[in-house]
Image (cartoon, coloured by chain):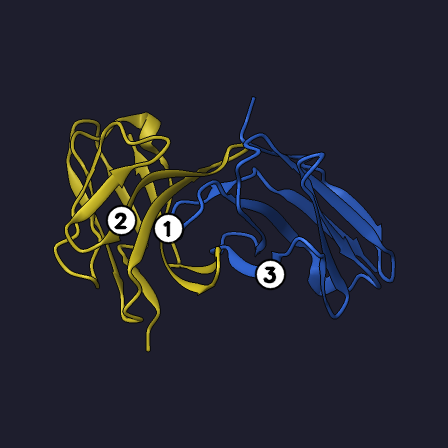
Amino acid sequence: NAGVTQTPKFQVLKTGQSMTLQCAQDMNHEYMSWYRQDPGMGLRLIHYSVGAGITDQGEVPNGYNVSRSTTEDFPLRLLSAAPSQTSVYFCASSYSLGGNSYEQYFGPGTRLTVT
Amino acid sequence: RKEVEQDPGPFNVPEGATVAFNCTYSNSASQSFFWYRQDCRKEPKLLMSVYSSGNEDGRFTAQLNRASQYISLLIRDSKLSDSATYLCVVNPLSSNTGKLIFGQGTTLQVKP
């Protein structure tokens, strides 16, 4: 049981390049999310999904696309990288603990630099 | 105004001290609340959920004050290993959608 896995761990892109950050979970969780974390800003939600085929925008979706074709995978695509997208990206999946309480498991993160 | 606000600190305390963090949230309809812990350059991990009646887990106590819209985390008998960033987290919705709002975190440094 690997939990939430993310690849790559590190990436350097040039402005204008596109790439896909991969995220997979093997816990059969319905809910998955992508966050970015910047110094002094905390984690900000980019996109989230409540199940295969269903995605929605979070707080900072511009410049990113997602898809959820399977329960396990939730890739994040950068369409045309910009220096403002330099950040640490975390993928998370969650399940319900009962009621409105649930635990979110995070992947180890992808450190992205755009030059 | 941010949806979830925390004092970023850092809080520097000696081993054995008691330390408390507060967090305020702006959406009065928020339904569930959590504290996460994040070590340097690592992913956040759930520390504890925060229940209306308050809850305790060993040296950690969490409280919720809905009227004033804040939650708190109390750490007693601080250990060196408690040094980390503590994230206040709010589920703004009444159901589980995977959508959580994070505060920017409060950094705790426990000194020998």
* Residue B102 vs residue B64, the one in the foreground: B64
Q: Which chain is blue?
A: B
Q: Position of residue A60 (x, y in %)?
A: 34, 30
Where disc 1 sits, the SS reads loop
At a point 55% along the width and 46% down the height, the residue shown is: B89
Residue found 17% across the figure and 55% down from its top = A52
From this viewpoint, which residue is outermost toward the top?
B1
Circle 1 packing at 10 Å, graded few (<14), some (14-19), many (20+), is many
Disc number for residue A49: 2
| The C terminus of chain A, quarter of image | top left
Q: Are marks 3 and 2 on the same chain?
A: no
Of residues B111 and A99, which is closer to you in this image?
A99
Q: Are marks 3 and 1 in contact (CB under 8 Å)?
A: no
**Label drawn at residue B98:** 1
Question: Do tag 3 and tag 2 residues touch (Cβ < 8 Å)?
Answer: no
Q: CA distance from mark 2 to mark 1?
A: 7 Å
* Quadrant of the image occupied by residue A78: top left
Q: What is the spatial separation of the Cα atoms under label 3 and label 2, in whole angstroms?
A: 24 Å
User: Alpha-carbon neighbours of circle 2 within 10 Å: few (<14), some, or many (≥20)?
Assistant: many
> CA gap, disc 3 to disc 1?
17 Å
**Numbered disc 3: secondary structure:** strand
The chain to which mark 1 is attached is: B
**Residue drawn 15% across the image and 36% down it:** A18
User: Which chain is mark 2 on?
Assistant: A
Badge 2 marks a residue whose secondary structure is: strand
Tell me: B45 left or right of A113. right
Question: Within the image, what quadrant is residue B56 found in?
Answer: bottom right
User: Horizontal and vertical percent for residue B105?
Assistant: 60, 42
Instruction: Evaluate whether label 3 is on the same chain as label 1.
Output: yes
What is the quadrant of the N terminus of chain A in the image? bottom left
Decide if residue B27 is on the left or right side of residue A114.
right
